[in-house]
Image (spheres, rainbow, N blue to C red):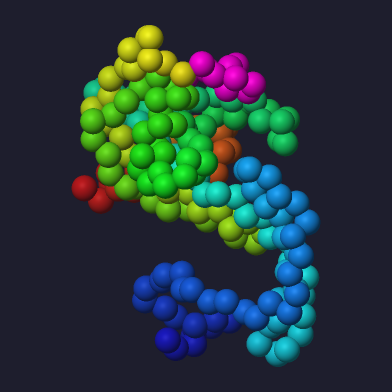
Amino acid sequence: MSPHPTLPGVLVDDVADRDESWPVASHEQVFTSGYLDVEVDAIVDPRGDEHRRVVVRPQGAVGVLALDEDDRLLLVVQYRHPVGARLVELPAGTLDVAGEEPQEAAARELAEEADVVAADWAPLLSIVSSGGYSSEVCQVYRATGLRPVPEDERTERHAEEADMEQWWVPFESVVDAVLDGRVRDATMCAAVLAEAARRARG
């Protein structure tokens, strides 16, 4: 690394996250549920100063970028109470089944939320969407070779999911919606742009 010639910072040729853990002077668990835990840690920085940080610890998550044979992207539209909106999202969910691998969870969520199964799976990207307060990592998969779940095997959806819509949208139209700011879900936006970049690179 070398200093930037005219601006603060250094010149770097390649980038990657790196594991690091500052000492924790105190730890308090303030909330726990089957979905997530909330903790308050006092971390110690390299100068020895302490700082209180709220940490939300969900169980981890998966998302599915599912494309049909005509390059239409499967999207689900779901009411989200915290933001007061119906968000356009990918089929997605949490790692809430003991011993389940992320790709298995992704396949389960695709079937549960959209009544669809896929023959072909490939990892697309891994996202830390809110690293300032949440430990959640979301693994997104690309799914193709789609077929419907038989009607007598479909999941009965409840609560917000019972009101969920399933849309099939031309992939390039979704890219436009992301770039225009008409859709905002972080996992969906990141996955769509990652797929667009993958295609552009050939």
The residue at the point 58 percent across, 38 percent down is 184
Left or right of 122: which side holds 27? right
* Residue 46 on image: x %, y %: 66, 87
Q: Determine whether 148 is above or below 7 in the image.
A: above
How far across and how far down the image is residue 24, in percent? Answer: 69, 77
Q: Position of residue 129 (x, y in %)?
A: 56, 52
Q: Is residue 53 visible?
A: yes
Quarter-of-image position of residue 162: top right
Residue 163 is inside the magenta segment? yes
Q: Quadrant of residue 107?
A: top left
> What count of labels does the image hold?
0
**For this rendering, which residue is in front, 191 or 156?**
156
Q: Quadrant of the N terminus?
A: bottom left
Q: Residue furthest front?
A: 98
**Up-down relation of residue 152 to residue 101 (above or below):** above
Q: Which residues are magenta?
A: 156-171
- Up/down of 171 relative to 153, above or below: below
| Residue 27 in picture, x, y percent from top left | 73, 69
Apparent side of residue 189 relative to residue 103 in the rendered image (left or right): right
Q: Residue at x 42, y 47 (%)?
A: 99
Residue 191 visible: no
Residue shown at 46%/73% (left/top)? 18
Residue furthest to the top in view is 151
Q: Is residue 27 above or below residue 79?
A: below
Residue sitting at x 54%, y 19%: 157
| Residue 191 lies in the magenta stretch | no
